[in-house]
Image (cartoon, helix red, strand yellow):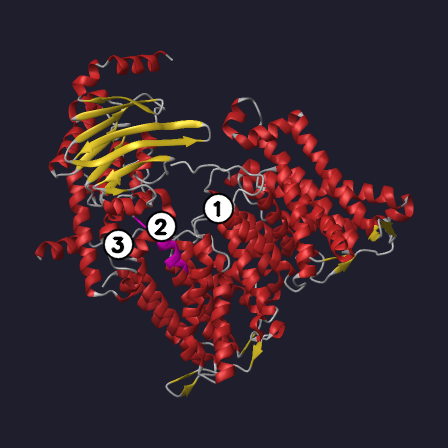
Amino acid sequence: MEEFFQQLTNGLAVGGIYALIALGYTMVYGVLKLINFAHGDLFTIGAYLGLTLLVSMGLFDKIGPLPAVILLAVMVMILVAIIGAILERVAYRPLRQSPRLSAVVSALGASIFFQNAIMAIYSPKFLVYPHDILPKTVINIMGLDIPVMRIIMFLTSLVLMLALYFFIQKTKIGTAIRAAAIDQGAAKLMGINVDRVIMLVFCIGPALGGAAGLMVGLYYGQINFSMGWMYGLKAFTAAILGGIGNIPGAMVGGLLLGVIEALGAAYISIAWKDAIAFCVLILILIVRPTGLLGERVAEKV
Amino acid sequence: MKSTNIRYLAFALAMAMCPLFLNAYWTDVFNNVGLYAILALSLNVILGHCGLFHMGHAAFYAIGAYTAAIINTTYGIPVLWIMPLAGILAGVFAMIVARPIIHLRGDYLLIVTIGIVEIVRIALINNVFDITGGANGIFGISRPSVFGFKISKPDHFFYLIWGFAALTIFLLLRLEHSRFGRALLYIKEDEVAAGGSGINVAHHKLVAFIIGAVWAGMCGTIYAAKMTIIAPESFSFAESVILFTIVILGGSGSIPGVILGSFLLVGLPEIFRGLAEYRMLVFGAAMVLMMIFRNQGLLPPGPKNYNVAKMLQAGGAK
Amino acid sequence: MTLLAVDNLSKSFGGLMAVNDVSFEVEKGSIVGLIGPNGAGKTTVFNLITGNYQPNTGTVLFDGDNLVGLPTHTIVEKGIARTFQTIRLFQNMSVLENVLAGAHCRMRSGSIAAMLRTPAQRREEQAAMLQAMTELEFVGLSKEWQNKAKNLSYGNQRLLEIARALATQPKLIVLDEPAGGMNDQETQDLIRLIRAIQDRGITVLLIEHDMGLVMRVCSSLVVLEHGAKIAAGTPAEIQTNPRVIEAYLGADSE
């Protein structure tokens, strides 16, 4: 039973990461009906930028661990948001009127470009985050030894998700985003600047993805230029699982996928861990393509 | 004779002369181009003609190659004899996996096929059924022979590969100009209209998948025989991406376009070998730029020729 | 003799009853019009007949077979061909290829025969080509056969859809607003064309807003309002039916 709870908490921590990345997929899909294949690579960029800033600025020595991590996260999120906005401007906006699948190919091209750019700039090898900067403390909760970092990671992703949720639900800009997701034409008529909304979505999603990248770097300690591909695919699976275009769905889907994967790796086979997520993806698309929280829509003839 | 036929014949002749002028290294480059061309042509049936965003083609290729490798190394059956079986197994696999997903919308299908090719690769690495040799793969596959003539040198392979490519092009051109080929194009243009015109959309999509898979499976046999060693990373997702890119950049649904795409994506990087690590970087950027400036590809399919006058004469005369 | 019998057909989308308990019959060889104000559910009825939608309840009997649950292509094979309200041609393909799409379901050769180019396959291709050109001649588009569909005028695109439908060799042709976007001259030609289709022994069921056309070509009419049938009868009966007049005036005053 202890094994089960260990895997459960582990799954929730990883699931938080998936959920953060999945939010980027789902928001873009909601507004543009586009799978932003390059989103996983923005996550990787977040991890690499985090490492560069961490090493070059020596923040941990200057201002202590907690302020340093927060400052680092803010910088990474801003930088990745800018890259996301540029991506939208260069690779997607010219294709707004093209067939939908042209944009998909463009997204794929952007993903390949980013991945290889990271490899060319850094290196094809795994890079290591400094490993003595964060507490290794383990706390005991109800007889269960849980690393503090795991809890912090889960809470951080939860806070970011809730912040986004309230931003989308309660603010005027959030309402504009929701309106643009339902009907772009109508939103335009109501005086919403849809171009700006899309730009904003391409800032928020990547910012969250970048934060997730930083968290993975800090938590696991090593990063690789191609890791965004696997994380991206799994986060996308999470978005589909919850119902693509649906923000609470991405959160639920991410956490659920993290748990399914952790339990599957523990009780089925660790070697097949990556395959589990893909099986979930295929099953959900066959059985219920609208996801757990999505609504069915009839195809118009 | 029609001018397109003359062009294909001239291309065939030029290719046939190639080994006379190429050294072993460049012959081998051309062999790779040929293998990719065959694979991309088979993908073109699914992606180019039928418009199905399929990015897991390496899975079918892998099944063919592993079938050949396993049967050859276990029972010593000559590799080329295994070709039909490899094709059939890949086709059966395609039928089983494609049936439940065939109705999915473009981008969903794309992501599912990515999932399938990843599952296949993971299965190969995990030495599924204890026959795939795990991450190390299978080695010691024997060289092929044709009528007792042992194929081992690059220029021997050149004729084997490009001969098979020529056969592929010949058959696929015929397919394109037929009831079946047209049905795929109708489905690509507008599924609802195709169904409303009496075309069995699901059936044709499935058959397109099976044809593409059979061909990729057969091509896998040649690959196994050429390399004598195969391993899971030869069939990674990146391979699927290259094939996908060849079709999209060359010109979806255009056989000359796909051949051109193979030369550009597989052959051209050999000229700039110093820049090899930037190859994929350039591919990525090229995909974005192509979609923005020329989304139909370099050599998009032209209008089909129908010799109506002749047809009407023949039809009216009976 | 009844060719098509729609019985108690209902279809809802979410909470909205788009078609509510609609029944009517189409006599073999007749021209029947389905009319009603915008949003009355006419196109939905068509989509239910052609298998694009599945009804919640009710049956569609065609030539004695129940069509409910059959896929669209099987329904075409059984002899119902359709055109679309929003033109759905294969825009980037030639006019000839568009008509060949209709001939598809009466052909048999598959992928292997195509690769081997068997004699039977070649004969079949020739026959299909001949038939396609004949249908183009019939609707008056034979000169355009090489043109891309998207380069045709709006009216000609409607005619091409009819040619494609006729190439399926239907018993019943279902036309969804065939005169939509046509000028007067084109509408006159269309009336002649619809009568010529009837003369070939093909039954016609159509949706049309052009009342002049409807009154002139249809032998009987079915009127829908808010998804329900409110009247049926000959054009003369419908013109004087108070319920129909109310429905149309009510719709106009909105």
C126 with respect to A36 (left or right): left
Q: Is residue C52 above or below residue A284?
A: above
Q: Kindly identify which residue carries mark 3.
A: B305
Q: Is A300 one of the magenta-colored residues?
A: no
Residue C252 x %, y %: 33, 14
Residue depth check, mark 3 versus mark 2: number of the one nearer the observer: 2
In the figure, C90 relative to C117: above or below? above
Residue C224 is left or right of residue A99, and the answer is left
Per the image, the residue denoted by label 2 is: B201
Magenta range is: B199-209
Answer yes or no: do the residues labelled 1 and 2 have beta carbons within 8 Å? no
The amino acid marked with disc number 2 is: Val
Q: Could you say where residue A73 lies in the image, as x and y percent from the top left?
A: 78, 43
Q: What amino acid is labelled 3 in the image?
A: Asn
Note whether C30 is above or below A205 in the view shown.
Answer: above
Question: Which one is earlier in the sequence, the residue at label 3 or at label 2?
Answer: 2
Q: Nearer the viewer, residue B146 or B250?
A: B146
Q: Which mark is residue C236?
A: none
Q: Mark 1: few, some, or many residues within 10 Å (few <14, many ≥20)?
A: many
**What is the spatial separation of the Cα atoms under label 1 and label 2, in whole angstroms?**
22 Å
Indicate the quadrant where residue C238 lies.
top left
Q: Position of residue B55 (x, y in %)?
A: 50, 57
**Residue at disc 3, secondary structure:** loop
Q: Residues within 10 Å of mark 3 (few under 14, many from 20)?
A: few
Quarter of the picture containing the N terminus of chain C is top left
Between B90 and C45, the one nearer to me in the picture? C45
Residue named by callout 1: A102
The image position of residue C164, as x and y in percent, is 24, 42
